Amino acid sequence: MTVSPRVRFADVHGHRRAYVKIGSGPALLLLHGVACDHHTWDSVIRQLARDYTVIAPDLLGHGQSAKPRADYSLGGFANGMRDLLSVLEIDRVTVVGHSFGGGVAMQFAYQYPESTERLVLVAPGGLGPEVSPVIRSVTTPGFHHVMGALTLPGIRHLNTAALRLAHACRLPGTRDIDEIASIYDSFKDSHQRAAVRHVLRAVVDWHGQIVTMTDRAYLTEEMPLAVIWGADDQVIPAQHAHNVAALAPGADVTVMPDSGHFPHRDHPDEFVRLVRRFVASTEPSSYDQERLRELLRDGPGRRIHRARAGRRPVTPLTGRKARPLTG
């Protein structure tokens, strides 16, 4: 594994924020998924830093950042990223978000379009209701105590070793188990467990994902959008990429074969190539308040199916298939 660059720290609203900043050129903001940290980008960050100024933070409640009792909503994370970028004197970024970080990226672009040049979503949340039962289980009342017992030293070491052995043996359904083993190991920190539970309860319940950007996806018409998904994703299904293709027809949608929930780790060279190609082939978004008003008045161009409060989530629509990855 490539060792990531030096971690730096900044205080924002009295909370310590850990981040990596490396390279020069146009700014890329890399946002990790829930229960991960900036290390998820280790295999791509140095390559990207050859062309861009890369900022990879640990979101609040994750990694080496503070884990306070605080606002762990998507809006709260978007605010935190705006404030961190302000401290770092960075005005505009291309936002690259993975999984939950993809949801934060979409929320950031929605709240701060004037600061967002492009969006790159990597197996993002917020585009359909389905999500792994493992993720849903974190929101249940007994999770904190049960996981506390399962992460006692002897049990944790045994289970982590078993998960990594299953991954090494390439047993069916174990593509992302190595990453899951790292997340499981991080749950030995009770503050990390509590923060992750707060995060997920804001966006997921037992029935699936609560928060959706499908009803606002039409606003991306004026913003370059790329989506990268692993065809074998067992955390958030790649079929959600079909929703993107239908909701945002101008989006550059790629489904990577032989890849799971972490395409940037499964195929780092190809991932970097896709990001570079996308940035080079698109002009940064230019915020236009009048155009935003027009889009809001016109609304989405097709019907979005929505569940009522207290009901099971529904699939927002059936879109066309995303194109497969070509060499």
Image (spheres, grey):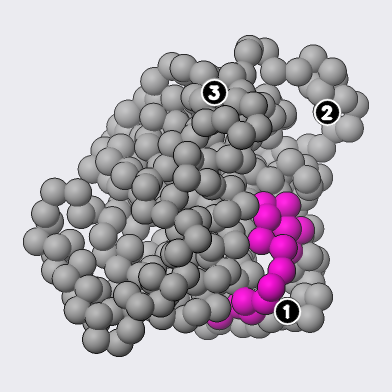
The residue under label 1 is which amino acid type? His
Q: Nearer the viewer, residue 25 or 68?
A: 68
Disc 3 from disc 2: Cα separation: 23 Å
Disc 2 designates what residue? 292
Q: Residue furthest right?
A: 290
Question: Residue drawn 44% across and 73% down?
Answer: 145
Q: Position of residue 1 (x, y in %)?
A: 30, 73
The residue under label 2 is which amino acid type? Leu
Compared with 134, 83 (above or below) is below
Q: Position of residue 85 (x, y in %)?
A: 74, 65
Q: Is residue 127 left or right of residue 167?
A: right
Q: Position of residue 39 (x, y in %)?
A: 44, 70
Circle 2 packing at 10 Å, graded few (<14), some (14-19), many (20+), is some
Disc 1 from disc 3: Cα separation: 37 Å
Corner quadrant of residue 302? top right
Q: Callout 3: helix, strand or loop?
A: loop
Please give the range of residues in magenta. 63-81
69 is within the stretch colored magenta: yes
Corner quadrant of residue 164? bottom left
Q: Which mark sits nearer the N-terminus, 1 or 3?
A: 1
Q: Callout 2: helix, strand or loop?
A: helix
Q: Position of residue 9 (x, y in %)?
A: 66, 82
Q: Is residue 203 left or right of residue 40?
A: right
The residue under label 3 is which amino acid type? Pro
- Name the disc covering residue 316, or none: 3
